[in-house]
Image (cartoon, helix red, strand yellow):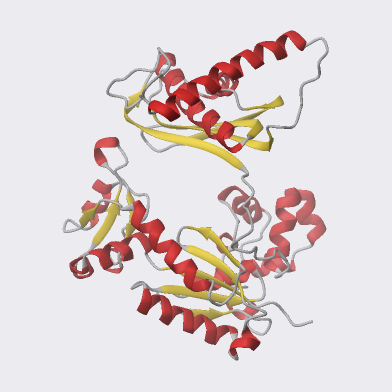
Amino acid sequence: MSEKVILHCDCNNFFASVEEKLNPELKKVPMAVTGDPENRHGIILAKNQLAKKYDIRTAEPIWQAKRKCPSLVCVPPHHDLYHETSKMINKIYLEYTDLVEPFSIDESFLDVTNSLHLLGVSGEQLADLLRERIKNDVGITISVGVSFCKTFAKFGSDYKKPDATTVINRENLEEILYPRPVSELFMSGKKTTDKLNSMGIKTIGQLAKYDPDKISRMLGKTGFALWKSANGEDGEAVRSYYEPREIKSVGNSMTFKRDLCGADEIRSGITLLSDMVAGRLRADGLKGNVIQLGIRDPSFNTIQKQKTVSKPTFLQKEISEVAFELALSVWNMQHPVRLLSVTVSGLVSADEDFVQMDLFSMQSEENEKIEQIEETLSAIRNRFGTSSIKFGHLADDDTGIK
């Protein structure tokens, strides 16, 4: 059986490239797509090639970027246009294979194993063909990694930018991959990287040659999965574009117009976000039993904590109560809060019955009443607008909580 041929196609400076297409004059100046400073989303979302020369980085504050480059031109994002462009690009990919798996708005995996002999080209040639198609038909550039597994294909698309093709195969993988820092391996987060470094594992090559049993003992399933990735054994298939995607979590976050301070304001923010998450869960017919809270202060320090509850829920009341408990356990209520996030995971179908009609039947009846109330609130909002009805303690003030 022949080895798979997988491409990872990554749009170069995607948001910025779409803005340059919208206004070609932006190609001549250092430019960044930025959030809204008035709503305290004043960070760099994307930048063009000229801005990169000033070491302007994604997610840094606008003021900091302008210190590096006083002439930086900042433009607001056009998210609808980005999504429209993304669909256009994936439609081109689908002309060559139905095994197209979008990984984010600007990158997709393609399994072209069965397409190559029909087209009479190699994986590298098809990657070059796609680069030209996207450049000519859409007006932006992509970089493409070509390999036998997802991990190495994604590494390849990052290896050389912009507008480049990189092939990583059995013959050259040690030369290209092994000297690189282990942090560059797909899905190797900071905490895992720090643990690997403390074990003396600094490079992908060192990880690939390490004893897998020791990795498993030290880092569990995550460590073993990374070891497999370093050896090109991730084995994960590229899913069809038309295959329904499994929802793994539902969450909402908000950066407030001013910092929240005090238990009442923080509780209001958590209640609002919990209500949004609960509404989305009900709309998708899902419940979850893992509730996570994220808190970020004005210095961008972030704390996350989660709790597993005894039974899955999609009730705003239950989600917000648990999230506020988490806040009390990790946060000084007098310390200012810039951003909050509430996420529910451990998802199951809402149709599944987790309620035991026993000693807790009274509690079950109470939850049914709460569920009916929340569903009624959702129905009113769907018909008359999200601001038509809200909780009395949610302030309509300068925080942005509405």
Q: Position of residue 385 (x, y in %)?
A: 38, 28
Q: Quadrant of the N terminus?
A: bottom right
Residue drawn at x 66%, y 16% is 368
**Residue 170, image x, y percentages:** 68, 81
Q: Residue 195, relative to residue 373: is it above or below? A: below
Label tally: 0
Q: Is residue 273 visible?
A: yes
Q: Where is residue 221 shown, x and y percent of the image?
A: 75, 51
The answer to whether residue 180 shows anywhere in this view is no
* 156 w.r.t. 240: above or below: below
Q: Quadrant of residue 256?
A: top left
Q: Residue at x 60, y 54 (%)?
A: 193
Left or right, residue 389 beside residue 247: left
Above or below residue 236? Residue 361 is above
Q: Quadrant of residue 266?
A: top left
Q: Position of residue 14 (x, y in %)?
A: 38, 63
Q: Which residue, as the protein is rendered here, is positioned at the far bottom?
A: 120
Is the C terminus in the top left, top right, bottom left or bottom right quadrant?
A: top left
Q: Is 173 left or right of 354, judged from the image as shown?
A: left
For residue 315, above or below residue 111: above
- Is residue 147 left or right of 161 when viewed as pictured? right
72, 362: nearer the viewer: 362
Residue furthest front as drawn: 383
Residue at the image point whose x is 56% and y is 69% from the top: 155
